[in-house]
Image (cartoon, rainbow, N blue to C red):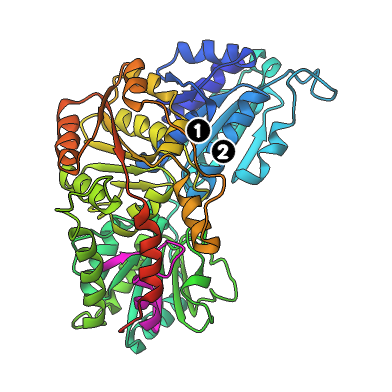
Amino acid sequence: MKASDLFVKCLEEEGVDYIFGIPGEETVDLMHSISRSKIEFIVTRHEQSAAFMANMYGRMTHKPGVCLATLGPGATNLITGVADAHLDRAPMVAITGQGGLDRTHKESHQYIDIVTTFKTITAWNSGILRADFIPEVIAKGFDIAKNVPGAVHIELPEDVAKEDSQKGPILKKSYSHTTHCDEIELENASKLMEEALNPLILVGNGAIRFGASEVLRHFVACSGIPVVTTFMGKGSIPADDEHFIGSMGIPDRDYIMCGLDRADLVICIGYDPVEYSPMHWNFNGEKRIVHIHQNVPDISENYVPDAALIGDIKESLKSLLTYCKVLDEMPQEFKDLRSQMVDELESYKLDDSYPIKPQKILWDIRQSLPRDGILISDVGAHKLWVGRLFPGMDENTVFISNGLASMGFALPAAISASLINPDKKIVAVVGDGGFMMNVQELETAVRLGSNFVVVIFNDSKYGVIAWSEMKKFNEEVGTDFNNPDFVTLAKSFGANAIKVETALDLKKSIEHSLYEGGVWIIDVAVDYSENIKLTKKLNQSSCNV
């Protein structure tokens, strides 16, 4: 069998149904083999977007998303998206072509050592030096991507792709990676819970990545312990659950931190410090901590667990259910924190000022989306508002890039989400800066017949940087720019577009776009004077807990 055919057969055996990317001369044999397979190749307009699409596919399906690029510039264009998947803990396999092995030992056109380049942004990566190695490399790569989870890179040189091999795909047997936590650690954790007067649960992305949300909800209902999530943990427990008090992650000291201050035990479930350092909520390193995760804790002076339940998160939580009755009723102070965050968003529902406040935009989006609708956030000032206030009602309904946190994520991610869930209502929120970083993918979205709405928070600047500069120096430097006419631009790609002229028009525009289907761009002038107002407000607030 030709090596490129074997490669594709192995991908089929792994259940790959889509590959996102841009072909090159060094991938022509592989592309020829893909064209004769069950796998659909989705051609994108930039390799970075292909990686973001694969990232989103992995996060939504818990199966590795796959992206492809050629050698040299194609591979380097993948880097940001691959690194984003690596730090977002999204299962992904990135495939790159490479020049023939007869020229990689010397200076050669477009050649750089991609395997070495990708080493720090992947959980594992490998070049294939012989056709016979293909089945083992692919089997190992997909296992690692799925179970870490994270990004994996596989390189296929053009001459290896042409070789013949007598090998076939490795037919994997069904087996479980379930591991159970240590019994002594379980007893230690239960004792800490019994002794705690004000325990608090902190949920991170791991609870969603490892499918533990349902068991988590049982544990919360049984224990009565209040819950805080990170941005990527949103939806693991519904925002309207009485035990959910909010999400943490903005640079300023938010109200939620008062709950962390009061807690004498923090039960960290799927918590990942890549999102929000424990330095922010355990500054003195004095809090008792229970670590519940598939992975060992990342020890620091601010994160030294008193008990570590390392193993399958679902199984660890099931084991803890035996000991779970801790609080008869959630303390009033935590109820007050919950009310404070809920009331803050709701207080803007009738705000009719223009430009439109970010809180009002998020309120109208939440009211327009069904409970199982999907919100995807790009990176910028709007992300901090989404992370703080947007209510996530179920796992995998709020998607935020919060590891590497790269701008340009949301539009490609929305394309992938629409491909996977064509019947779901999807809204991507982007800043004008992030939107322009991958605006070319509007062509991809229209070509694929995607269904989603993009809401642009338009302030003609890099808003989150301006916010940071104002906080530190009370001036903005190097953040302003001019925008094109987004309505005309979107229509030139074949998309639909609306410019919102009043606050009263916003909700109607979102609902109309979601109902009509297709690709819609909604241009909204945002009032980001709210950013520094929030900073001042939080700086002046004090904890009453």
Q: Residue at the spot x=49%, y=58% of the render?
A: 470
Magenta span has 248?
Answer: yes
Q: Quadrant of the N terminus?
A: top right
Residue that mark 1 sits on:
51
Q: Secondary structure at mark 1?
A: helix
Amino acid at dot 2 = Thr
Q: Position of residue 175 (x, y in %)?
A: 43, 46
Q: Residue at the spot x=44%, y=45% of the render?
A: 379
Res. 140 in view? no
Residue 434 position (above or below residue 364)? above
Residue 251 position (above or below residue 437)? below
Question: For this view, does 302 lie left or right of residue 233?
Answer: right
Q: Quadrant of residue 319?
A: bottom left
Q: Earlier in the sequence, mark 1 or mark 2?
A: 1
| Label 2: how many Cα within 10 Å (few below 14, some 14–19, many 20+) | many
Residue span colored magenta: 243-267
Q: Position of residue 247 (x, y in %)?
A: 34, 63
Residue 453 or residue 480, whichever sits in front: 480
Amino acid at dot 1 = Ala
Q: Position of residue 256 (x, y in %)?
A: 34, 71
Q: Residue at the spot x=19%, y=36% of the render?
A: 510
Q: Quadrant of residue 130?
A: top right
Q: Quadrant of the C terminus?
A: bottom left
Q: Quadrant of residue 232?
A: bottom left
Residue that mark 2 sits on:
80
Magenta span has 146?
Answer: no
The Cα–Cα distance between marks 1 and 2, rounded to whole angstroms, is: 8 Å
Question: For this view, does 276 lie left or right of residue 392?
Answer: right
Res. 523 in view? yes
Circles 1 and 2: CB atoms closer than 8 Å? yes
